[in-house]
Amino acid sequence: MLTRQEFFRFVVVLAMPVFVWGCAGAPSTGPSAEQVEPLLVAAGFKTVVASSDKQLQHLPTLPAGQVTVITDTGKDWFVYPDHAKNRVYVGTEAEYRAYLKLRAQNNLPDKDPQASYYKQDTAMTATSKRYAGIPFDGWPEFAVLTWP
């Protein structure tokens, strides 16, 4: 029969590896698509399904798990790819701001969106001047998605 002190030591010896193993997990890489996509829809982003070959080829070039700013026809579009379902979520700056607000309300980490926005905006402005709309060539005109 174990004494109370021996039992306590036995529990501590068994619990310690579990505790250490639990704390040693990999750091989180950010919210999952299952967390982000409902927020995008709630913020007013529209869903555009990639249906043509050109769209399906362009979709993998968009960085997974982040909103990318695309400048097309002089307007900024905020695009979030869903690679698994071959679609993108598209919004304007108003929807993007609403999305950031929802992220904050749901305690999701913020990845410094302004730095990403300005970096991408600068690159896309230069590209647009050279190629005038080529980045989303083959996609439907986003402006016809009836924005409020």
Image (cartoon, grey):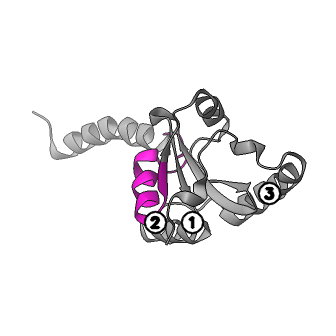
Q: Distance between the residues labelled 3 and 1?
A: 16 Å
Q: Foreground: 130 or 45?
A: 130
Q: Residue at x 70, y 41 (%)?
A: 137
Looking at the image, residue 35 lies above or below residue 15:
below
In the rendering, at what x and y percent does residue 118 appear?
78, 62
Q: Give the secondary structure at mark 2.
A: helix
How many marks on residues? 3
Q: What stretch is highlighted in magenta?
A: 25-47
Q: Which residue is drawn at 77% across and 43% down?
A: 134
Please, what is the three-letter code of the amino acid marked with disc 1?
Answer: Tyr
Q: In the displayed structure, does residue 60 sit left or right of residue 19?
A: right
Please, what is the three-letter code of the amino acid marked with disc 2?
Answer: Ala
Q: Which mark is residue 108?
A: none
Q: Mark 3 vs mark 2: give the one in front.
A: 2
Q: Distance between the residues labelled 2 and 1?
A: 7 Å
- Write down the residue under mark 1: 96
Q: How far apart are marks 3 and 2 (CA)?
A: 23 Å
Assess whether mark 1 and mark 2 are in contact (beta carbons under 8 angstroms): yes
Q: Foreground: 133 or 45?
A: 133
- Write down the residue under mark 3: 119
Please, what is the three-letter code of the amino acid marked with disc 3?
Answer: Lys
